[in-house]
Amino acid sequence: MKCRLLESHGKCERCKRKSLDCTFRKHQRGRRPAVKRAANAMISNPEDTNEADGIPTTITESLTDSGRYRPSSERQHGEEPANARAEADKAFWAESDNFRPSDLLNREATSGHFSLLNILSTTNRTGTPAPSDSSSDNPIQMRLINYIIAVTLFDGFMKHLNPYICQLDPIMHTFAYVQTTSSFLLTAILTASAKSMNPAVYPALKDHAETLFSRSFRRGQKSAEVVQAILILTYWKELDDTRAWLSVGYAIRLSMELGWHKLSKVQHENDHVKTDLERRTLRNCQRTWLVLFVYDRSISLQTGKPRMIERSEFIESVEIWLKHDLALPMDVLLGAFVSLRLLTSDVFDVLEPSSTTDRALHVHGTDALLKSLGFQIRTWEDHWIRLARTAACETCHLFLIRFYGMHLQLLLSSFSLRPALLSQSTEAKIRIGVIWSSNATAIQMLKLVSDPAVSPILYFAQDSVHVMIAYAAVFLIKLLFCVPKHARADLETMTIEALRDAARSFAHQAAPPNSSCWLQAKFLENVLNDYSRPSRLRTETNDLAEAGRVAPHQHSRTRAHNEADSSALHQEMEGADAHGEQSQLLNDTISPDFALWDDDMWEPMFASAGFNITDGTFLADAYTQA
């Protein structure tokens, strides 16, 4: 019953009779409960909330009373007021405007909470609370690492490793923020940093990171922090870790559950109504989605496996995204990578023929396309180098732009080499320029990593950079085996010199055993040794060939002669005639028709030098025996 004040009294008759406090309330018929709650909240405490939606105005204020920030994906649906839930339930049946499963089924079931409980619910809320990242998983609280060392490793990651992967915003992702937001992300950062900066604490952190990874998978945890943690664990892997493609695929699926694949074209008109935290959080999601796009296309190119992320208006508007007032210098490198993948990611499907007949038709039709692509890549490099210098990007950013451009040029050159190496006519002499160009591109890649200004920063480069270096090295050696004899001598001198300089550069890094730089130095040394020392395959092939032409009693003399030639070849690497004989023997057993994704062709050569191209990992046994 409402109090009704009389004009001449301070209390109504009922309250006066019962000795109650008299509170007069105006008539509020027709006002929604949500409006009343918002009005009462603004009256009772107007300074605590934003005018638009009650969101804290700074990153610091976004921490809860317990000191822990909760991403939107981890907030409990049970915190929603009862009246608001009732209104949502009432509107459930009026929401669908189509007859597709994604439109008719419960919105919770089609927006990241796909479970039978949610599908069979007529309310727009999950039946169980969303799992959250427990603070008890914090590696510091678990005493896996000292606080001071953890802060040092975190700072080292942000300074030396993060610039290579363009993933975390240094302004948003402070140590305090990451520690209170996600134990999984914090552990992943410390693990990656410890691998190169403090190997003593690495094993315990690595095991804990794997535990949190498995736990997040079992619980179905979905947040930007989980996606970023998974990616960080794939950049600097263990020697025998073959899960990169699977892990990236899982991270992409998580991102799609979060709705990132529906990100719209970049627009900045409404930024003024958002808080700094909201703007940085949104940009953090956008940045991670762009990183996933680049990673997805790159790993597909390296392994020949399908890609998952398609082009979209948001991805194609990356240069507009870079003009945002919250853009970071490292975003320029990310924009360069996105632009490069957009430029060439679909080209390889066109250039790779599906049959021998198609290949013959492609021989005369690819030259113009490849020449045009080569020009576009050079233009791309000049454009983004200029932007990187204007934005005062770091040395590693300038290096990576040049390095990735050269690597893509090298991949494209393999298509030009096919007709040049397969042709038995005089036309092959005309195409000698293609051979020289391909050789020069691979040598430029090795010279770039040997540059004294660049070499020191490669200590922190992610594994994918080392895979590209390995590809360039084996490309050069295989090219020597395939080119005509008259062109081999000059190419050989430059190739051996470039390989030696690169091997020496990585050896001078003083990297710990089983680190990326240590493995790269061993790999390049093995490549040189395999080329200078005749392999068992070549010796046995020569023996079999001679056995068919000589008498049985002459076989032992022929074999002794071959072994003498092999010894001379090992001692005199620079002898053109000796190498010519060796290469000719190999030409009898290996087809010059090759491509990066032809595993049957490339795998033996990589494996002999200590690298598994199928899994993208170094082979530990090859180095322990060396």
Image (cartoon, grey):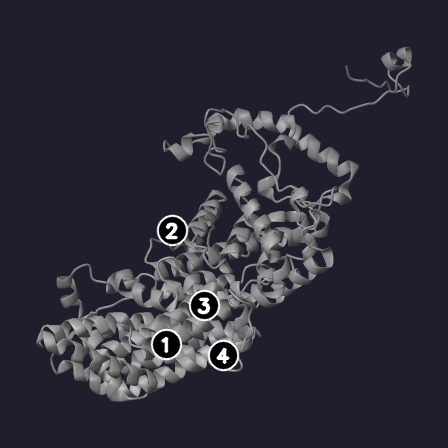
The Cα atoms of the two marked residues, 2 and 4, are separated by 37 Å
Instruction: Tell me residue 475's x, y (percent).
Output: 32, 73
Instruction: Tell me residue 132's x, y (percent).
Output: 61, 39
What amino acid is found at the position of numbered circle 3 in the picture?
Val
Mark before the other along the chain sequence, 1 or 3: 3
Local packing at callout 1 (Cα closer than 10 Å; few below 14, some 14-19, many 20+) is: some
The residue nearer to you, when weighing 566 against 282, is: 566
The kind of secondary structure element at disc 2 is loop
**Image marks 2 and 1: residues in contact by CB distance under 8 Å:** no
Residue at horizontal 47 percent and vertical 71 percent from the top: 400
Q: Decide if residue 204 is on the left or right side of residue 443.
A: right
The Cα atoms of the two marked residues, 3 and 2, are separated by 22 Å
The residue nearer to you, when weighing 22 against 556, is: 556
Q: Decide if residue 391 is on the left or right side of residue 302.
A: right
Q: Give the residue pinned by disc 2.
A: 308
Point out the image quarter for the N terminus. Answer: top right
Local packing at callout 4 (Cα closer than 10 Å; few below 14, some 14-19, many 20+) is: many
What amino acid is found at the position of numbered circle 2 in the picture?
Met
Give the image quarter of residue 104: top left
Q: Give the residue pinned by disc 3.
A: 465
Residue at horizontal 44 percent and vertical 75 percent from the top: 402
Q: Give the residue pinned by disc 4.
A: 505
Q: Give the residue pinned by disc 1.
A: 529
What is the residue that sits farthest to the front in this orientation?
A: 553
Mark number displayed over residue 73: none
**Image marks 4 and 3: residues in contact by CB distance under 8 Å:** no
Q: Which mark's residue is nearer the viewer, 3 or 2?
A: 3
What amino acid is found at the position of numbered circle 4 in the picture?
Ser
Local packing at callout 3 (Cα closer than 10 Å; few below 14, some 14-19, many 20+) is: some
What amino acid is found at the position of numbered circle 1 in the picture?
Asn
